[in-house]
Image (cartoon, rainbow, N blue to C red):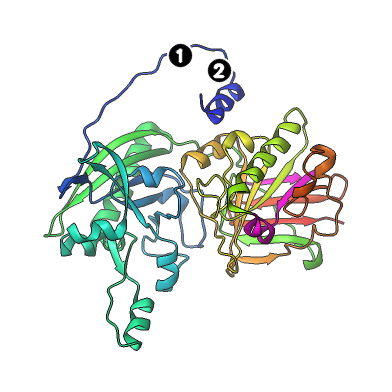
Amino acid sequence: MNPSALEYRRQRGLGFKDEQMALLIQRVSGSMYEDFLMPNAAGVGYSYSAYKWDDSIDASDGMLRLVMGLGTRAVDRTEGDYPRIVNLSAPERSTLTESWAKHQYSQRYVDLMDYTTKSLSSRPLKDVTPYMDSWYKKLVLEHDSDAERTFRERGQRREILFANCEGLVRNTEFTGCMKSLLHTLQQAYQYPVDIEFTINGTDTGEFVFNLLQCRPLQVGTRRDAVTVPSLPEDKTVFSVTGSSMGGSRAEDIDYVVFVDSRAYYEFPYKRKPDIAHIIGDINHHFRKSNQNLLLFVPGRIGTSSPELGVPVSFAAINHFCAICEMSDSEVGYMPELSYGSHMFQDLVEAEIFYTALFDTPKTRIFNRTVFHDMPNILTEILPDCKEYEDIVKVCHTEGMHLKLYSDIQNSETVLGFES
């Protein structure tokens, strides 16, 4: 069985319990295009959003993760792809404003049912767009105006498209329907819910919504009010707004595990999974301790593609109290707010705190060199890992008054040393 599934069961006292599982077979929702079938768009929706990256966002309005094609790419962190994140308080608002940035962090592959191979398949977006009608393109595709302008200046005319479901997001009837539906389901369940759905449109602007699944959404249980102190800048490791998940808290940090983004980037591609294994070994070493471990990683944690981040499983990080994803634009690492994905649902249920450190004004302070001068005890824990000391650093911070504060209500998170 999957190690993460086994660990999930063990933590909940189900490790040795025999359970029967039902198998539900559903007809795939969608339309035929040449030799493949797919819906116009699909995704997952949540009646409660733990991410409040803007003061105008109301968590109770919910959020969506939208993709073109089958919704499998909305559920998991997939290689090279980013779904469209839609906060239903302000559907068209995004942390990405320029077309090059929207393009860089967009969907590049489309999941579909391939009738030639009779299997679920992923195809590059450019191989699917020739079969799309113009109205469908307007629904899910957007022009990279920056790139097209560059080519025009060179005397070339090129159409450069990327998938971000912009037309669907701008459809107020659609976003209003989703907001109302999620609110109604939450009232019926008397608990926050998550859903999976498909959308199929027409050239007249109408759309058909198919609800595929609805279940209770784990949103964590930490609700205590926390006052975040104002620490001196030289005592602050990071201070961020609007990119955290996991409830309000104030916790002492006993150990910090820091994966250096530049060193990880320069490490051979084929050996990058070694870093995931080392993190798993550190996690295993502390499994029976009551000490709080905080993990810093570049890019996306749990990705299937090592060049985008560290490809760990949930079972390899389940004893950390907090996870921090770091961006590094110079080498191309970018966190992804994957609230609702399988990895993040595991984090929520285990009450593991998460924050993303973007290269934006939302990250008010981030001193990524603060741990450089501290002793690295990696080889004390894992004697055979000396060659990885430049990439993975383990700092024993117990007694240094390193504390993590988070006030989710005011969207503020601080990690720093108290006097």
Q: Is residue 144 left or right of residue 388?
A: left
| Quarter placement of the C terminus | bottom right
Pinpoint residue 44: horizontal percent, then vertical percent: 36, 44
Nearest to the observer: residue 343 or residue 107: 107
Is residue 259 left or right of 59 when viewed as pictured? right
Given the image, on which type of amino acid does mark 2 rest?
Leu
Please, is residue 211 above or below residue 55 in the view? above
Q: Amino acid at mark 1?
A: Glu
Q: Which residues are magenta?
A: 248-267
Q: Give the image quarter of residue 380.
A: top right
Which label sits on residue 19?
1
- At horizontal 60% and vertical 22% (from top left) the residue drawn is 10
Q: Are marks 1 and 2 in contact (CB under 8 Å)?
A: yes
* Residue 20: quadrant of the picture: top left
Q: How many marks?
A: 2
In this view, the residue in front, 408 or 102, is: 102
Q: Which of the 4 image quarters holds residue 331?
A: bottom right
Q: Is residue 118 left or right of residue 79?
A: left
Which residue is found at the position 60% from the left and 52% from the top?
355
Q: Which residue is mark 2?
A: 14
